[in-house]
Every structure is written in structure tokens, then in C-alpha cells.
Amino acid sequence: MISLPAHIQNVLDQVTEFADQAHGDQTRKYTPERYIVHPVRVMKILTEYTTDISMLAAALLHDVLEDTPVKSEDIEAFLEHIMVASEVRKTLRFVEELTDVYVKPDFPHLNRRQRKELEVARIAKTSKDSQTIKYADIIDNCVEIVKHDRGFAGKFLFECREILRKAPNGDPRLYEKAVMTLNVAVKQL
């Protein structure tokens, strides 16, 4: 893990607190841990590859729009007090690109496979930085799913493989780590 400058660490500490509060009492699906442990692990994976404050902040916020009542405007208003405008715009863009669009409540006529196919096509068009964050998210989730839900893991790992296959434009080192992590997870099934 790269040692971060104090000013970046200070911003990330504030973003962590904001994301933790946004997720409220949510816990990880398979453990009683507060939900924030996952975004923090995703961010820590990323610190091995970048010190870009917008990418690291987006890693911490990547599930907020999807899983909480917090809106883009709320994130933007918060970030404006701790980041410069260009960093706020980049962070928000990454968070929005990482937020699933084809969710069951909005597309009830589609089954999971159809929704995931549309998500993969959408993710393939996102920025290289968002794809890089997605690789860190996949790494953390693959490890957890195999450990806690072997029944669902096969389907989930297939979906991750499709994302990696169609969204290869992020950091090539982290991409390789995600592919290796996925391959190990598949072998553990």
C-alpha cells in the first residue's frame, strides 16, 4: 500500500465517515460487519496502484447511490467542502459510472441475466479510472462470495468474468490481479 500524503488521507477520512453515515446500519450481506468495511477495502486495494484522490474517494462512495437514499447532489455538496471543483466533478463522475443502472425495481420485466448483460455493456463504456475501481471491487467481492455463499458464487463469478472480459481498459496491473483473483475463486468452487 502506498503511503498517502496527509492532506489526501484527511480528505479520505472525511469521505469514509460520510459514506459510513450514508450506509447507516447496513451490514455486509454475509457478516455482521458494518457495510463501510467493503468500500474501505476497495480503496485500500486501489492505493497499491494510484494516489488519485478522486479515484480513492469514489472507491469509498461507489455503493452510496445504489444502496442508500443519498443522491448525487448530496455527495457533490459534501465534497465541495473538502475538495477542489475538478476533483469533485471527477469523483462524482466515477461514482455515477460505478452505480448500477439496470436494477430490478426500475427494470422488473428483465431477469437478472438480462439486467447484468446490460450492466456489462454499460460498464464497458465507462472511463478507464472507473473500470480500475471496478477491478478492486471485483477483487474484494470475489474473495467474500466464495467464502460465504458457494451456491450463488458460480453465477456471481460468471458475471464478474463478463465484466472483466468486456471492460479491460483500466489499470493493466490491477486488471491482471482481478483476473487472477477471479480464477482462484472459480477453482475454489
Image (cartoon, rainbow, N blue to C red):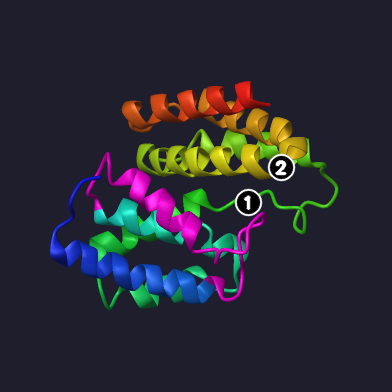
| Image quadrant in which the C terminus is located | top right
* Residue 114 in sight from this viewpoint: no
Q: Quadrant of residue 187?
A: top right
The residue wearing badge 1 is: 101
Amino acid on which disc 2 is placed: Asp
Which residue is painted at 49% across and 77% down in the image?
A: 21
Location of residue 29 with respect to 154 vertically, above or below: below
- Numbered label attached to residue 141: none
Other residues around mark 1 within 10 Å, as few (<14) / some (14–19) / many (≥20): some
- Judge left or right: residue 11 versus residue 15: left
The range drawn in magenta is 23-52
Judge whether residue 15 is colored magenta: no
SS type, badge 2:
loop
Q: Residues within 10 Å of mark 2 (few under 14, many from 20)?
A: few
Dot 2 corresponds to which residue? 149
Q: Earlier in the sequence, mark 1 or mark 2?
A: 1
Please tell me whether mark 1 or mark 2 is closer to you in this view. Answer: 2
Q: Answer whether residue 42 is magenta in the image.
A: yes
Q: Nearer the viewer, residue 148 or 21?
A: 148
Q: In the image, what residue occupies the spot 47% across and 71% down?
A: 20
Tag 1's secondary structure?
loop
Give residue 177's position: percent from left, percent from top. 40, 28
In the rendered image, the residue lying farthest to the right is 109
Quarter holding residue 28: bottom right
Give x and y (percent) for residue 66: 59, 60
- The x, y position of residue 62, in whole percent, is 48, 56
Viewer-nearest residue: 59 or 154:
154
| Left or right for 115, reference 80 | right
